[in-house]
Image: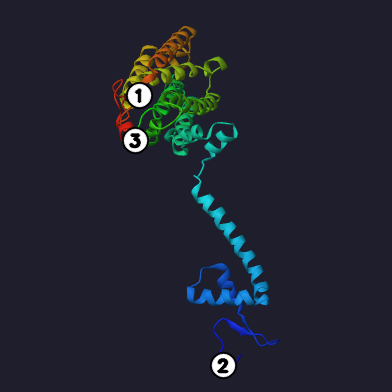
Amino acid sequence: MTGTQPAGHTHDPGGNSTHLGPDLLRAYATRPLPAETRDPVEAHLDRCAACRERLSPLMADEAELSSLWERVDRATDEPTRSPLERFALRLGVPEDAARLCAAMPALRWSWWGGAALLVLLTVVAARWSESTSAPLLFFALVPALSAVGVVAVTGQRFDPAYVWLAVSPLGGFRVVLLRAAAVQVLSLALSAAGAAGLPLPFPYTLGWLVPSLMLTAVCLALSSRMDALPAITLTLAAWAVWLAATYNTDLPAATRLLLPGTQLAMAAVALLGIGALVVLRDGFDRFDKQGRTAAPGGPTAGTRGLA
């Protein structure tokens, strides 16, 4: 063959045929070519064994590249999992339940960082203050934090992911209990760590446990029939009244909260709250777009939007 050779072709010194150049072979193997370029290349490959042999390793590279892109597609399509969600999955928690829990505002690092800082400050104040009533701040704050953390999972006002309840196969009440349990476990762990630093004997350092469970149960029961904000407001207002009524400077931490009788009374209130929560559990299956419960038997804004 004489004359100017086509671009991308090289002359075979051992014969009279023209072979495809390495750049053209790589381009054909790795990306689509225009028809006017692709057709002559394929026609040449049909009759040239040498070029087909040179193309084979390049096509192997293409297969590897395709596999890489498939892995990239899977990585971008799959949701990013938080450490908490991955931990829950390792424990055998179903994927949908783990995602519902991990999406809660009350399980974000910012929330727990702020809560830990408040608990730390109350412990420091209790240890370094000369006042006998200083530990009372810890016993007042810890149950309130527990209730606030739980109420953040019971309404759309604080948790945009709460709308998932409308389509969750678990049901509203089960999801609320699951998320409240997750918050409570972390809250109890944080509170126990803080209580270990209080300047009080061991039995008194557990005085926060029953109040935390009491406020949580009461707040959840109220949330089944009203918006999350008034539920937590009423709960914390009642807690403030209770703290004032049990204040006594002659007792450890200047409060009757740590006395056995008061602990039994709060345990009874907690049991009543749990009972009310079970009776009113249907309220968590009916909520409107503001996080309030809807009228029994009527469609909610969330479910209407899904229809």
The amino acid type, in three-letter code, at marker 2 is Gly
**Whole-number angstrom distance, CA of label 2 to CA of label 1:** 89 Å
**Mark linked to residue 232:** 1
Question: Mark 2 near mark 1, Cβ–Cβ under 8 Å?
Answer: no
Q: Nearer the viewer, residue 306 or 248?
A: 306
What residue is rendered at 50% in x and 45% in y? 80
Dot 3 alpha-carbon crowd within 10 angstroms: few under 14, some 14 to 19, many 20 or more? few
Per the rendering, the mark at residue 3 is: 2
Closer to us: 116 or 188: 188
Residue placed under numbered mark 3 in the picture? 306
Q: Comparing marks 2 and 1, which lies closer to the viewer?
A: 2
Q: Mark 3 belongs to which amino acid?
A: Leu
Say which quarter of the image contains residue 87. top right
In this orientation, which residue lies closer to the viewer: 236 or 219? 219
- Which image quadrant: the C terminus? top left
Quadrant of the rendered image containing residue 155 = top left
CA gap, disc 1 to disc 3? 29 Å
Q: Earlier in the sequence, mark 2 or mark 1?
A: 2
